[in-house]
Amino acid sequence: MYIIAGLGNPTREYEHTRHNVGFDTIDIIAEKYQIRLGEKRHKALIGKGCIAGEKVILVKPQTYMNLSGESIDEVCSYYKVDPEEELIVIYDDISLAPGKLRIRPKGSAGGHNGIKSIIAHLGTQNFSRIKVGVGEKPKGWDLADYVLGHFSKEEAELMETAFQRAAEAVEVLLEDDVAVAMNRFN
């Protein structure tokens, strides 16, 4: 069983912002694999289904980004999954151009507060992640204002493609391994 978690902030005001690309990708995955995200458990919206012959739990933490680890830790503990082997986290990355993907098997938080929280709660930084590029903040902008802002029309079109590619990357991670996914999507 795999936990596939997309990071973001709950409530309408944050829908489709740069910081919510994890949520948007989970929505695409749920639609593609007909997984209903209706159950509220473990401080998250979750949905159970199957992708590439593997049982999966899709997770959208409802704790707000900076506390994502609370939810992810609860889900991993409840379903008795090994986060180092059976967790995939999807989130925004300002160091990548809009729409670019970077898959990693492990790593530091790199300044991302949601990932910092997950590492702190799980006690490991060894879990797979799919970073979705949202672009660098413009000079003079506040970082929070930038990541909580919406995409331009042109960027939004790039992001739709990125969400589809990230969904494909999840399938490759489940069918093959992280090295294959990195070679194909990075």
Image: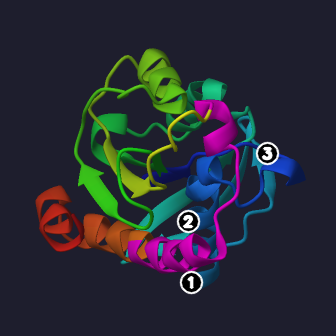
Q: Is 155 in the magenta?
A: yes
The amino acid marked with disc number 1 is Lys
Which disc number belongs to residue 49? Answer: none
The amino acid marked with disc number 3 is Pro
Q: Please give the name of the residue rendered at 54% of the width and 31% of the height, measured from the top-left corner.
A: 114
Q: How many angstroms separate mark 1 from mark 2 (CA)?
A: 11 Å
- Left-right relation of 109 to 39: left
Q: Quadrant of residue 69?
A: top right
Q: Please give the name of the residue rendered at 72% of the width and 71% of the height, measured from the top-left corner.
A: 36
Percent coordinates x, y for residue 127 in the rendering = 31, 38
Percent coordinates x, y for residue 3 in the rendering = 48, 50
Q: How many angstroms separate mark 2 from mark 3 (CA)?
A: 14 Å
Q: Is residue 83 above or below residue 22?
A: above
- Left-right relation of 62 to 115: right
Examine the rendering and report whether any part of residue 1 can be seen.
Answer: no
Q: Quadrant of the N terminus?
A: bottom left
Q: Which callout, 1 or 2, points to the residue nearer the camera?
A: 2
Residue pointed to by mark 2: 25
Residue pointed to by mark 3: 10
Q: Please give the name of the residue rendered at 27% of the width and 64% of the height, measured from the top-left corner.
A: 173
- Disc 1 is placed on an element classified as helix
- Disc 2 is placed on an element classified as helix
Are the residues tagged 2 and 3 within 8 Å (C-beta)? Answer: no
Are the residues tagged 1 and 3 within 8 Å (C-beta)? Answer: no
Residue range of the region highlighted in magenta in the rendering = 142-165
- Disc 3 is placed on an element classified as loop
Q: Is 159 in the magenta?
A: yes
Residue pointed to by mark 1: 32
Q: Which callout, 1 or 3, points to the residue nearer the camera?
A: 3
